[in-house]
Image (cartoon, helix red, strand yellow):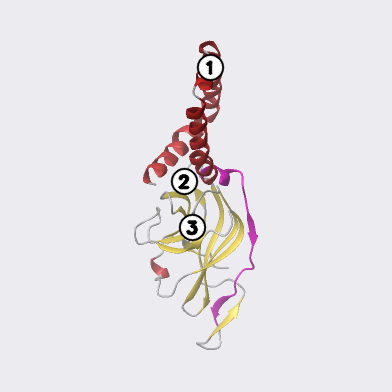
Amino acid sequence: MELLGDLERAFASTIYPNRVPIAIAAALLAAGLVILARRRRWDLVARRHPRATIAAVIVAIAVGGPLGWYLGSPLFLSTSIDEAAPAAVVQASTGPEPTAAAPGGDERSGMFAGTDEFHFGSGTVQLIETEPGSFTVRLEDFAVRNGPDLFVYLSPSADGYTDDSVELGRLKADTGNQNYEVPEGVDVAGVGSVLIWCKQFAVLFAIAPLEPAAKS
């Protein structure tokens, strides 16, 4: 799968930005192959070897069909979700005991951005303390390029994925408001960013560096 990840990154960095001239060249190449096939009567070769032709077609469909659907379907399929925002813990002004309140207080937040022209990302993220010592990651007005096997991660780096990044779960939808609980024992003070990461092919789709939320 590492090869597919490298191919995906090459597509995003080279092919996608030049998709228009590449599409024109591909159309011209396809037209040239059709003309060549007609002139050399490749159809007669296929008719003389029907079993080999049928076997090749079956193999191409059996292998290329599922793989093409797995890799390509997220580009035109989209899902949306709208989960309610969690209540945050704030310190009561009359004593040391925390009380529940609307999201606010000493949160950390950030803005999502894609990693290139193809892997776009937008929206905000908040790291909210919902109970003393318990935290939830909240994505709002969120959108990302859909893809296979996308997960939400916390990274200690503000620049991207590291080997000690913490998985929060599979991305619930490529658009919309959504919440992810942070596992117990995670040191949220050491979190540098929230990532949308393709786990299957090790490709970073979007990143949101975290900063202290602005005080009102």
Q: Secondary structure at mark 3?
A: strand
Q: Secondary structure at mark 2?
A: loop
Looking at the picture, tell me which residue is in the foreground, 156 or 92: 156
Query: Which mark is first along the chain, 3 or 1?
Result: 1
Q: Quadrant of residue 27?
A: top right
Q: Quadrant of the C terminus?
A: bottom right
Find the distance from the CA under tag 1 to the CA under tag 3. 50 Å
Magenta residues span 71-92
Query: Which mark is first along the chain, 2 or 1?
Result: 1
Foreground mark, 1 or 3? 1
Mark 1 residue type:
Leu
Q: Check whether the beta carbons of the residues at disc 3 and disc 2 lie within 8 A of each other.
A: no
Mark 3 residue type:
Phe
Q: Residue at x 39, y 71 (%)?
A: 187
Looking at the picture, tell me which residue is in the foreground, 51 or 82: 51
Query: Which mark is first along the chain, 2 or 3?
Result: 2
Q: Which mark is residue 44?
A: 1
Give the residue number, with chain letter if any, for mark 3: 151
Q: Residue at x 49, y 53 (%)?
A: 149
Crowding at label 1, few (<14), some or many (≥20) Cα neighbours within 10 Å?
Answer: few
Find the distance from the CA under tag 3 to the CA under tag 2. 15 Å
Q: Quadrant of residue 103?
A: bottom right
Mark 2 residue type:
Thr
Crowding at label 2, few (<14), some or many (≥20) Cα neighbours within 10 Å?
Answer: some
Give the residue number, with chain letter if any, for mark 2: 115
Looking at the picture, tell me which residue is in the foreground, 136 or 95: 136
Find the distance from the CA under tag 1 to the CA under tag 2. 49 Å
- Rendered location of residue 91, percent (x, y): 53, 81
